[in-house]
Amino acid sequence: METSPAASSTVKYKRIVLKLSGEVLRGKSSDPIDAGVLNRMCTQVKEIHDMGVEVCVVIGGGNIFRGLQGESRGVDRTTGDYMGMLATVINALAIMDGLEKMGVNTRVQSAIPMNQVAEPFILRRAIRHLEKGRVVIFAAGTGNPYFSTDTTAALRASEIGAQVIMKATKVDGIYNKDPKKHADAVKYDTLTFIEALKNRLNVMDSTAFSLCLDNNVPILVFDLNDPHAIRKAVVGEKIGTLVHS
C-alpha cells in the first residue's frame, strides 16, 4: 500500500496547488515541450513530494494552443478554449510521465472525460490520492470555456483545502510596475488581496483572484528558474511575493 511519507517538521505548507504556465515547458527551444525543462520541473516536484508535501499541479496549455489566440486565427472563442483545454491534457501527461520515471506515483484527473488517458475529476478520489502520497495533476481546466487555468487552480485549491497556491512564473515576484521596462520597479515581499486590487496588480485574472479572496487561499508568486524554488517556498524561506488576506 502506498503511504505518504512523513512530513518534515520544517515544512510550512502540507498541501499545495502548484500552478505552472504551459509556456514554461517550451523553454528556449522551438519545441512545445522541452525535455530539459520538463525534467527540471519534475525534479522540483519530486523534491517536495519526498519531503511529505501533498502536491497538486495545474498546468496551462499556452505552449501548444491558447483559446484567446485562436480568435485571431479565425477560431471561435468557445472552440478555441476547448482546444486549449486539450492542450493542457498533453502537458499533464508529459509531467505525469516524467514524474513516474522518477518513481513518483502520479494521477491525471481531467475535467473533460477521456477515460483512456486520464481519470475524471472526482474530488474525494483526488484527496484520497494525496493522502496515499500520489501527485495529482488537474487537466482540462474547469471543463468550461471562458475560464482560465488560473481559475482552475483557485477552484481546485478551494475544493481540496490547499494551504496555498504556488504560482511559478518567469519573474521573481510581484512588482509595482514591469521590471523589464522600468529599472526603478519595486518588488513586494507580501501584499494583501485588497492592496493588490487597489494597486491593480496583475496577480491572477479577476475570476481566479476573487475565488482566492473569497475562500482565503493565499497566492505565492515566485520564479521557477531557481532550481530549488519550490522547496524554498514550502519550507517558508523568503522567496517571491505572498498575497494573503
Image (cartoon, rainbow, N blue to C red):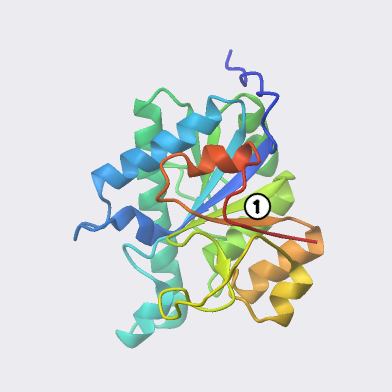
Q: Nearer the viewer, residue 106 or 11?
A: 11
Quarter of the picture containing the N terminus is: top right
Quarter of the picture containing the C terminus is: bottom right
Q: Which quarter of the figure has residue 35?
A: top left
Q: Amino acid at mark 1?
A: Arg
Label 1: how many Cα within 10 Å (few below 14, some 14–19, many 20+): many
Residue at (49, 44) in percent of width and height? 229
Q: Which quarter of the figure has residue 26?
A: bottom left
In the image, residue 41 lies at what x, y percent? 39, 42
Up-down relation of residue 193 to residue 106 (above or below):
below
Q: Which quarter of the figure has residue 10?
A: top right
In this figure, which residue is indicated by the disc labeled 1? 156
Residue at (39, 28) in percent of width and height? 100
Q: Residue furthest front?
A: 184
In the image, residue 205 lies at what x, y percent? 60, 73
Q: Residue furthest left?
A: 30
